[in-house]
Amino acid sequence: MAKIYKNYINGKWKVSGNRETFENINPANTKQVLGRFQKSSQGDIDEAVKAAKKAQVKWGKIPAPKRGEMLYRAGELLLKNKESLARDMTREMGKVVKETRGDVQEGIDMAYYAAGEGRRLMGETVPSEMPNKFCMSVRMPVGVVGAISPWNFPIAIPSWKLFPALIAGNTVVLKPASDTPLSAINLVKILEKSGFPPGVVNLVTGTGEEAGLSLIDHRDVDLVSFTGSTDTGSLVARHCAKGMKKFSLEMGGKNAIIVMDDADINSALEGVLWGAFGTTGQRCTACSRVIVHKKIIKKFTSLLVERAKKLRIGDGLDEKVEMGPLINEIQRQKVKKFVDIGVGEGAKLLAGGNYQKGKKYSDGFFFQPTILGDVSPKMRIAQDEIFGPVLSVIPCKDFEQAIGIVNDSKFGLSSAIYTQDVNRAFKAVENLDTGITYINSSTIGAEIQLPFGGTKGTGNGHREAGTASLEVFTEWKSVYVDYSGKLQKAQID
Ligand code: UN1
């Protein structure tokens, strides 16, 4: 019998009101069931939000450095349990164990960072127009945060949402993706041990349609922080707008690497392979377009294809494996469909293009590392987010054209350029319309002390991580202290 996991509400582990559960399987071996999880509905959400609302009153009054101490403990416990957390994560979402260790590390980094923020949470002091008057702005909590997290970074992304929210004095209800509830439970167990009072952190598992929407629509949720697909994000936006809630969205990408003719080819090759096939291409920062200068495109593409074909595919728990499976069958069919669309549009299939064959792979959602050549910038495969190991190779004649191709996208998350020319590198920084730009590195691998997010259709103007995250999780309060002993009228006296 599969183990049954519960929701965490008001400091207690509880089954859902309707007693329904759903199964969580290993995408590398679908015969392996990791457990059954609560299929929560409105009643469970109501209970969790009620607990969060009640707890927020006291939590918001605890000095931020004290809140930080709890987050610091969470960081210590994440570090202590890093290996088992990583292995559970590989089992439930498939990415290789080196990467799941990195995912947990990102949570650790965020815990320490947010803990330190407890002693800053900087506001401003500015001069007043008048004598004997003091002006400052301070950060206040928003209230109850509904956090909806995706399956591709099952600990890192909940950490990006929860830790800044908590340090700022908010309480949280987390609804993790239904493909990765175990990692979210593992994280919340650590928060429970770190000393957060009941109601400060709550977790409800279930589907997006039921648990997710109930959370978004709940009257007492003040802010929704969402990471996921563009379609779902737009639904979240519409629901939040109806309820006049604050919301922050982190959505798709169609990230590109430019390889100029003066690039260090080996380094560019490593960067493109890592960006395109790391996490089986399932990162919102994944490199899905490589724009290569025509002078080197032939050589570069042939090296790329040779290397992609050699990538070791399999169960991510095997340390030698370089690429795990896709998350589920729906995703695998979607990826296959995109490859077919690309070929139909006239792209040339240079590597992969199909489900990974062989008995060893028959119980998992494996897909071959895929490279499409002769791709033109307007093709759907060059425009739509695929979220799989599919790379489009696009030729360019010069730097200006390359920049134009990168920017010809409805998304604007991450971009990169390989060049040895410092002038070109800085021009790229200035002209690439993305929230993140890398020089001589891949499109993936953002560090948590910098803002994370993108322009255009990637988000709604907010950023996660870094101090920028505080703009989402706090409300500004401007404070005027008049010590003149009389009424002073601004703009008039
Ligand atoms: C995501 O793909 O949703 O920069 C997040 C990176 C990681 C985070 C990716 N640190 O690739």
Image (cartoon, grey):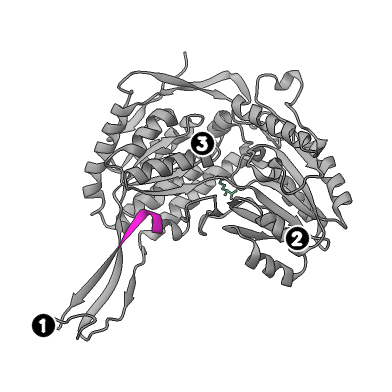
Residue 153 visible somewhere in the drawing: yes
Q: Quadrant of residue 336?
A: top right
Q: Which residue is mark 1?
A: 486
Give how far apart the Cα atoms at labels 3 and 2 are.
44 Å
Q: Amino acid at mark 2?
A: Gln
Give the residue drawn at x 84%, y 47%: 301
Q: Position of residue 288 (x, y in %)?
A: 69, 45
Q: Position of residue 71 (x, y in %)?
A: 38, 50
Q: Which residue is mark 2?
A: 401
- Comparing marks 3 and 2, which lies closer to the viewer? 2
Q: Position of residue 272 (x, y in %)?
A: 73, 49
Query: Relative to the observer, which residue lies in front, 428 or 138?
Result: 428
Disc 3 element: helix
Magenta-tinted stretch = 471-476
Which label's residue is closer to the chain start, 3 or 2?
A: 3
Which label's residue is closer to the chain start, 1 or 2?
A: 2
**Does the segment drawn in magenta span residue 474?**
yes
Query: Relative to the observer, which residue lies in front, 394 or 206?
Result: 394
Give the residue drawn at x 53%, y 47%: 105
Give the residue drawn at x 62%, y 37%: 97
Question: In the rendered view of the protein, which quadrant contains the C terminus?
Answer: bottom left
Q: Quadrant of residue 433?
A: bottom right
Give how far apart the Cα atoms at labels 1 and 2 are.
64 Å
Please give left or right for residue 49 compared with residue 352 in the image. Answer: left
Q: Residues within 10 Å of mark 2 (few under 14, many from 20)?
A: some
**Does the segment drawn in magenta span residue 54?**
no
Residue 440 visible somewhere in the drawing: no
Give how far apart the Cα atoms at labels 3 and 1 are.
61 Å
Q: Position of residue 163 (x, y in %)?
A: 40, 49
Relative height, residue 68 to residue 286 (above, below)? below
Q: Which residue is mark 3?
A: 85
- Comparing marks 3 and 1, which lies closer to the viewer? 1
